[in-house]
Amino acid sequence: MSTQTVTASALDHTFRTLVAEWHAATRFTASPAAAAAHPAYRAIIDLGPDAVPLILAALADAPDPWFAALRELTGADPVPSADRCHPAVAAGHWLAWGRARGLV
């Protein structure tokens, strides 16, 4: 097994653990900003750009409020202002952005 595979596996495990912690702690939180301020969410961002494909995969499963993390990690924002209030539509824009870059 290569070091890269082990590293990817460890990143995936850490990501999933943090997501589970974040979901458990914020499942009744109505505010995306409050959910994005949770320490587990911040720890996901601290994983760095390697977390972007994992976030996009999670976004494909459910339109959780990943948008702040994606903007912070990528410096991009492919969601037109008219679509910001529509999580499923915004997710579609991010997923198209990720597909165009081979991240999804």
Image (cartoon, helix red, strand yellow):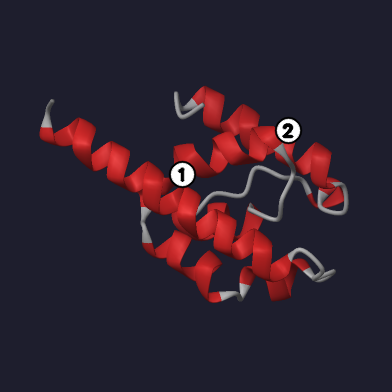
Q: Residue at point 57% right, 56% down? A: 20
Disc 2 on helix, strand or loop?
helix
**71 or 18, which is in the foreground?**
18
The disc label shown at residue 5, or none: none
- In the picture as drawn, the residue positioned furthest to the left comes out as 2
Q: Position of residue 43 (x, y in %)?
A: 44, 67
Question: Is 51 rendered above or below residue 43?
Answer: above
Give the side of residue 93 with respect to residue 43, left or right: right
In three-dimensional space, the C-alpha distance between marks 1 and 2, rounded to whole angstroms, equals 15 Å
Amino acid type, label 1: Val
Q: Is residue 37 visible in this depiction of the protein?
A: yes
Of callouts 1 and 2, the N-terminal one: 1
Query: Which residue is under mark 1?
Result: 52
Q: Position of residue 58 (x, y in %)?
A: 60, 40
Residue 98 position within the rendered picture, expressed as x and y whole percent measured from the top left: 54, 31
Image quadrant of residue 6? top left
Q: Residue at x 36, y 58 (%)?
A: 47
Residue sitting at 53 percent across and 24 percent down? 100
Q: Is residue 74 visible?
A: no
Q: Residues within 10 Å of mark 1 (few under 14, many from 20)?
A: many
Towards the viewer: 14 or 35: 14
Residue at horizontal 52 percent and vertical 68 percent from the top: 40
Residues at badges 1 and 2 in contact (C-beta under 8 Å)? no
Nearest the viewer among 10 and 79 is 10
Quarter of the figure that contains the N terminus: top left
Residue named by callout 2: 92
